[in-house]
Amino acid sequence: MRKTEAAKVMGMERADYLIAGAGHAALAAMHAIRLVDAGGSLTVVGRDRQLPYSPTVLPYVVSGRSDPKRVFLRDEAYFACARTAYRRGHAIVRIELASRIAELDDGSRIEFGKLLLSSGARPVIPPVTGLQAVPYHVLRTLDDALRLRAELPRTRHAIVLGAGLIGMHAAENLSKGGARVTIIEVQGQILPGYFDADAAAIIARAFEHDGRVTIQTGTRAVSAEAGAQGGVVLHLQDGPPVSGDLLLIGAGVAPAIDFLAGSQIRCDRGILVDASMRTSVEGVWAAGDVAQAASFYEARPVLNGILPDAVEQGRIAGMDMAGDAALQGYRGAVPLNTYSYFGRHAVSVGSGCAPPGAEIVVRGDADAERYLKVIFDQGRLHGIFAINTPLDAGVMWQLVRRRTDLTSLRARFLAQPREVGRALMSRLWR
Amino acid sequence: MPAYNTIAFHADRCDMCGACMTACAQAKSASDSPRRARIEVLADGAGSFGLAMCRQCADPECVQCCPAAALRKDAETGIVEWDHDRCVNCLLCTVACSYAGISLDEAVGHVVKCDHCGGDPACVRACKTGALEYLTTARIYNEVGALEDLFVPGLAGCQGCNTELLMRHTLRRVGPNTVLAAPPGCVPGMGAVGYNGMTGTKVPVFHPLLTNTAPMLAGIKRFYKRKGREVTALALAGDGGAADVGFQSLSGAAERGEEMLFLVIDNEGYMNTGMQRSSCTPYGAWTTTTPVGRESPGKSQDAKNLPLLMVGHRCAYVATASAAFMTDFYAKLDHALEASRHGFAYLHVYSPCTTGWRFPSRQNIEVARKAVESNFVMLWEYSPEAGLRLTHPIDDPAPVKEYLEAVGKYRHLTPGQIAHIEHHIADNVAAIKRQATAPL
């Protein structure tokens, strides 16, 4: 109370709840807070000057599928209705934990009661000699997307560094736009961490089908230099150099946590949190891409840059911050991915790392581009990976989390994962 | 925030004929393939059926997980709306939903979900067994909730009593242009008439005798009519007053076609004055005047079927209702109100009494439901033009023992008494069904 009054005297802004970031985790937390606390003051600080949007939509802005004016997740009226101060185009640059004050990039200071760090991730730029001297694109903000979209019509040969989801989406858009594309991936397959080598091979074939996309896996770019007419030449560890007129770096993302350097908040690769998304410092929570939370599978906490997981972590943080009695703790990160390419659909739920003694079943039909891989661990679903095979990813996620025993249903499950999943849903969690 | 309509699924009535899925596929996908439907009925592997379809969640996970703002919960209709122009086919909504409520339709290459067909779901229309039901009870909350409550706050009913609910809803719906008669019974007993010279209502209310409720109300109605003013004459009476000493004057008013709405809240006895039996008390029931002991096994006569007697008067409208079926009650209240503009409308509401019937106060609505589902009481409506029609037919009634066991006043019943009750119910069902199929 005394602090609040002091803040008032000094004319300092005060927020019972301060949320850093305006992405999915931040918005889920804000929603959860407002469900139980209508009165507490709430401030959201978003780095982007735009209304909130999702990084996941950006490849579709590049391709023209999404109208950049219609991708916003909330409007100003929503924040006004929720009586939330939305500070756009600002980032927290420093936190004084002792006095509970956050300093923004414009020098303004906000005194907070509770703080949620959900400021997301930023692209990783791999250590390639000379890279800083050549033009390249990344795809993490709406501005990035608009810049890349503007380049598409005049791109004849693009180089995509990294065969993750961002790189693959961009490669598809570029090739559909008529450009030749070379994808360079350091690991031995495309979409590493999302799909196994067999599934990745099926997906890669769809890309290589029309001859415009070349995929080079298992090699890394060692240096970059300017090419002719504003282009770029990349020298690889193995093989001849690749030249193009556009370079896109899609080498993954890392938590944006540099502003915490030197603070008492314990970090590893991200901000370490417990099952309620609390950090090591009382009154400070973290959720989403910045947070390193428990894994469903392993003892060590993990970064899980998955949209539905960010929503869940944000909700948990918000509920805990507002003291919601219905809070259930975080059950651990499960990798979840959906990927649509050239009209095909791939889904992965769960871990692809089979523990010792696990049973791995693969059903495939290369011609039909159908693929199904299921990993059972002691009769329980450990992971399921499908291409052009209908199944309900949300139902599979529940089966994994609930450790539902599928021993007696194994054969039927493999034949009809969608039907058996729905029957189990009807019985177990209606 | 309004309440919303919903599609309910009664697995016990489903025979898995698949008509709902075909109807949906035809309506939404111009296809006869059930795989193209947005509703799937499936065997749950444990002897029952489940449903995979969008539940139009109150706080939808799919909306929060959509990166393209293509999903949103419509605040007016409650439908989770999908926007084709914004959707980017990322399928993250299918990850977010634990209920398979939104899924990829491979034939069109994007996700599809139920939208209630804009308020007239094709699946419900196609369901012949009643397993799917489109519940529009939200209307009560949305429409009636906006009407003024015309009773004072804090009526002094017993714990768990349904009568306050019935009174408040009735007067709300009937409206402020009403004169209310509340003869002796629980309705004035809990404060409807008022205390210390203040009325318990925001409409004119009076407290007639048990014997003259209908004629007093008839006189008032005629007086207003002569003055050129249209008012609703409403009686909220108990079964004792209506079926016993008040019956002569009730019968007379009905016979003359006096324009009023006479609503009887039937709690099967004089519960307000110490739980004495009335002619509406069922056979076998314990009351303080039909005690249970060496000499007496509870009431030894069957209840009078008062609503059926009113049908015999060929009233403009007669109906039975239950506190457990409020949608049905509201439809009948509307019909009765309409009929009271030109004749005598009689509405008989079966209303379990926690105190007098001896059951836990939290069980009231459950007891009322069991009475209907065992055919102990039946829900129907009658008008001279349309005849008698069952509004909630029970084709496969629950054993009446389940109902009797839920109510303390039947705790002592012998197998012989139960057999008598079962026989009486069968007689009653047959009599009502005869009326329902009789030519006008």
Image (tube, coloured by chain):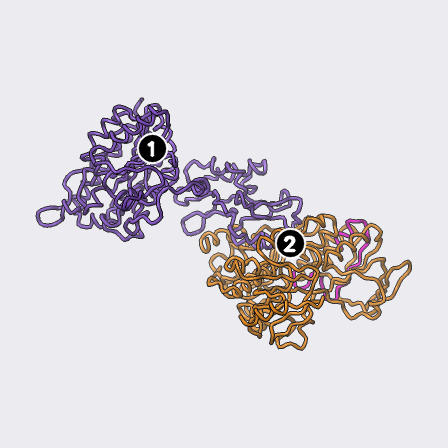
Chain colours: A orange, B purple
Chain identifier of the residue bearing label 1 in the image: B
The C terminus of chain B - image quarter: top left
Asked if marks 2 and 1 touch (Cβ < 8 Å), the reply is: no
Q: Earlier in the sequence, mark 2 or mark 1?
A: 2
Residue B126 is left or right of residue B380, and the answer is right
State the SS at label 1: strand
Q: Name the residue under label 2.
A: B67
Which three-letter amino acid code belongs to the residue tagged 1?
Leu
Question: From which residue to which does the magenta span run?
Answer: A171-195
Q: In this view, does A308 lie above or below B353?
A: below
Q: Which of A211 and A317 is in front in this view?
A: A317
Q: Distance between the residues labelled 2 and 1?
A: 50 Å
Residue B390 is tagged as 1
- Name the spot of residue B105 as percent of width and height, x first: 60, 45
Q: Which of A7 and B421 is in front in this view?
A: A7
- Name the spot of residue A399 as percent of width and height, x first: 51, 59
Chain identifier of the residue bearing label 2 in the image: B
Name the residue at the left extreme. B295
- Name the spot of residue B87 as percent of width and height, x first: 65, 48
Residue A358 is left or right of residue B376, and the answer is right
Q: Does the magenta stretch include residue A182?
A: yes
Is residue A72 visible to the viewer in this orientation of the structure?
yes
Name the residue at the front extreme. B197
